[in-house]
Image (spheres, rainbow, N blue to C red):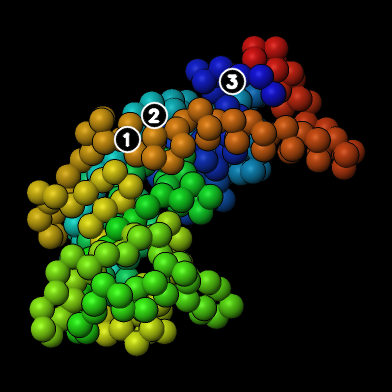
């Protein structure tokens, strides 16, 4: 496929387009749809219709909420939190424990956490209202680096075989857990501070690795996400990202152009599958034909 016109708006699922327009969670969008509050006026028709939340919406379609038109929000918000220990990485903890709700109330509307840290782990959490960037950061094949400080109740020497085991991989429940980099940053006669960088994002990965290698982890702190650092950000504080930081994060995950090409390729697959199933998506096929011409 030829080069892509990066300014042309891609067709999006109705659920995602409404979530972007209103800066709402997908759960709330579902509730609005179930209540019959969402309508779409598609090109060539003058009557509002109720469409499936999985229906593709194009740039020249009009979205209505309670009969009023919706405009897609063009700005996105990005924030970084230095999460304290014993805070659940969700908007609401079902057990009434400390969660992210106080921080979310302060952040711009529509922000959500990108990934999680367990309650016992402190450190950086990225927040955004940009679903594309969130998905790019979380995609395993993009290998976004996350760097952690480990405080170990062990004395490790540079030639300790457990350090090489972290890099070679540790088996856990049929998976191989691997660190990209590992280095000792500080050591006393009783303890070791270790810096560990991952590109995998398995649940409680470092804790499983330490347990398998008989490393006694006292505390775990995430200090970097890609190019973003906790330098100057106090524990329990958050700040917005600068435009330069957002650009650096996009660059670290491969850039917007690469993501757009992936999405266009997925739309081509969707069109082929629909035609093979005997239910061609004619508007999508026309859009893709124009996309090829523009390329």
Cβ atoms under marks 1 and 3 closer than 8 Å: no
Mark 1 or 3: the one toward you? 1
Q: Residue 4 carries which label?
A: 3
Q: Which mark is residue 18?
A: none
* Foreground of the two, 122 or 167: 167
Residue 287 appears in the rendering: no
Horizontal side, residue 133 vs residue 243: left or right: right
Q: Residue at x 55, y 80 (%)?
A: 173
Crowding at mark 2 (Cα within 10 Å: few <14, some 14-19, many 20+): few
Q: Residue at x 39, y 72 (%)?
A: 164
Q: Dot 2 corresponds to which residue? A: 73
* Foreground of the two, 67 or 138: 138
Residue 209 appears in the rendering: yes
- 1 or 3: tag closer to the N-terminus: 3
Crowding at mark 3 (Cα within 10 Å: few <14, some 14-19, many 20+): some
- The answer to whether 125 is drawn above or below residue 63 in the figure is below
Quadrant of the image containing the C terminus: top right
Q: Is mark 1 on a helix, strand or loop?
A: helix
Q: Residue 248 carries which label?
A: 1
Mark 2 or 3: the one toward you? 3
Task: Using the rendered view, name the quadrant where residue 235 is placed.
Answer: bottom left
- 2 or 3: tag closer to the N-terminus: 3
Q: Is mark 2 on a helix, strand or loop?
A: loop
CA gap between label 1 and label 3 equals 22 Å
CA gap between label 2 and label 3 equals 23 Å
Residue 83 image point, x, y percent: 21, 61
Residue 39 image point, x, y percent: 58, 34
């Amino acid at each position: 496929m030829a080069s892509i016109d990066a300014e042309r708006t891609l067709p999006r699922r109705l659920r995602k387009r409404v979530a972007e327009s209103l800066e709402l969670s997908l759960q709330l969008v579902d509730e609005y749809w179930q209540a019959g509050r969402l309508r779409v006026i598609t090109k060539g028709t003058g009557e509002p219709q109720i469409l499936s939340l999985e229906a593709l919406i194009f740039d020249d379609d009009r979205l209505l909420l309670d009969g009023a038109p919706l405009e897609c929000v063009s700005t996105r918000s990005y924030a970084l939190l230095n999460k304290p220990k014993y805070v659940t990485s969700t908007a609401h903890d079902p057990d009434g424990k400390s969660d992210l709700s106080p921080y979310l109330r302060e952040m711009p509307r529509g922000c959500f956490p990108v990934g999680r840290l367990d309650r016992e782990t402190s450190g950086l959490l990225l927040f955004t209202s940009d679903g594309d960037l969130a998905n790019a950061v979380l995609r395993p094949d993009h290998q976004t680096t996350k760097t952690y400080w480990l405080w170990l109740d062990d004395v490790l020497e540079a030639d300790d075989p457990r350090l090489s085991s972290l890099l070679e991989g540790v088996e856990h429940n049929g998976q191989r857990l691997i660190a990209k980099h590992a280095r000792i940053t500080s050591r006393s006669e009783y303890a070791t501070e270790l810096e560990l960088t991952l590109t995998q994002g398995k649940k409680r990965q470092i804790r499983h690795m330490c347990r398998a290698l008989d490393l006694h982890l006292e505390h775990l702190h995430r200090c970097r996400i890609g190019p973003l650092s906790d330098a100057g950000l106090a524990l329990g504080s958050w700040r917005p990202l600068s435009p330069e930081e957002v650009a650096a994060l996009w660059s670290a995950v491969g850039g917007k152009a690469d993501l757009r090409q992936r999405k266009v390729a997925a739309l081509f697959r969707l069109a082929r599958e629909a035609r093979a199933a005997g239910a061609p998506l004619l508007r999508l096929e026309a859009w893709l034909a124009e996309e090829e011409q523009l390329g």
